[in-house]
Amino acid sequence: MTPARVYEHPETEEIAIPRVLFALSEPLRLSMVRMLAEHGEVDSVELGPDLPRSTLTHHTSLLRESGVVFVRAEGRKCLIRLRRDDLDARFPGLIGAVLDGYQEAAPAREDA
Amino acid sequence: MTPARVYEHPETEEIAIPRVLFALSEPLRLSMVRMLAEHGEVDSVELGPDLPRSTLTHHTSLLRESGVVFVRAEGRKCLIRLRRDDLDARFPGLIGAVLDGYQEAAPAREDA
DNA sequence: ATCATCGTGCGAGAATTATCGAACGATTTG
DNA sequence: CAAATCGTTCGATAATTCTCGCACGATGAT
């Protein structure tokens, strides 16, 4: 039952604002975070069903290394969830402001 | 008295979150914004006294085009101020969270 | 055991961004 | 007017980042 893939995550105190902001500055990653905020923990493939797997890994790794998401292996797939508590503890209100602002800024995106 | 240099600024509604986050994801630009938040309106050269002017223009232009700062010409120099009200109106709490988080994340920076 | 499926690492190429010197126009000073 | 100063633009180069095909090890199903 020992998960094969083990992921490195920065400690809460190690999470740095510039890296977080950069991770969220990419529209694709921002939409991923938005989905993660709505649903709790999602399969990685749901974050980008039409994306090449290597591209998906690239973005999820960046989100993970910046401290935005937590990744864990479950069998063959990998599950991802937002580190909401850690982020709120370190940067109170940041994620909430970003999600609220993004929702208002880019409401319609159901077409693609 | 007509200012020679005229700067383009995005409207408040045009300010997009990804661009703002990207602008703030650069440590240098983030320190600029931090200074702008403390002091009201500052001379552009104060944002980076040791930087080449072309590099300084590059960063200030990026901050301006993303809607983070307002730039105006005053004689030979150019004065820059944070668009705090516009940013707060569009993305409530975002700038505050970024500044608070950054202050806590990188407290000591009085040496340079 | 065999095979299909999944995520990852590697590599290459494209795209974006960062840095900075040099030339230019505009402005202030002498 | 002439000289000094300022910010901007342009161009080139370096540094990052993005995208994606491919091979590989691990996992689950037959």
Image (tube, coloured by chain):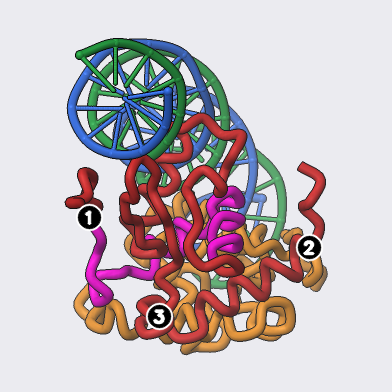
Chain colours: A red, B orange, C green, D blue
Q: What residue does disc 2 label? A: A107
Nearer-the-camera pick, A18 or A99: A99
The three-letter amino acid code for the residue at tag 2 is Pro
Q: What residue does disc 1 label? A: A8
Q: Chain of mark 2?
A: A
Q: Chain of mark 3?
A: A
Q: Are marks 1 and 3 in contact (CB under 8 Å)?
A: no
Ranked by sequence position, the earlier of labels 1 and 2 is 1
Nearer-the-camera pick, A6 or B108: A6
Q: Residues within 10 Å of mark 2 (few under 14, many from 20)?
A: few
- Distance CA(mark 3)–CA(mark 2): 25 Å
Q: What residue does disc 3 label? A: A85
| Residue B105 visible in the snapshot | yes
Dot 1: what SS? Answer: loop
Q: Are marks 1 and 2 in contact (CB under 8 Å)?
A: no
Question: Seen in the image, is A30 located left or right of residue A77?
Answer: right
For the record, the magenta segment spans A8-36
Q: Chain of mark 1?
A: A
Place of residue B71 in the rendered image (x, y in percent of width and height, measured from the top left): 66, 69
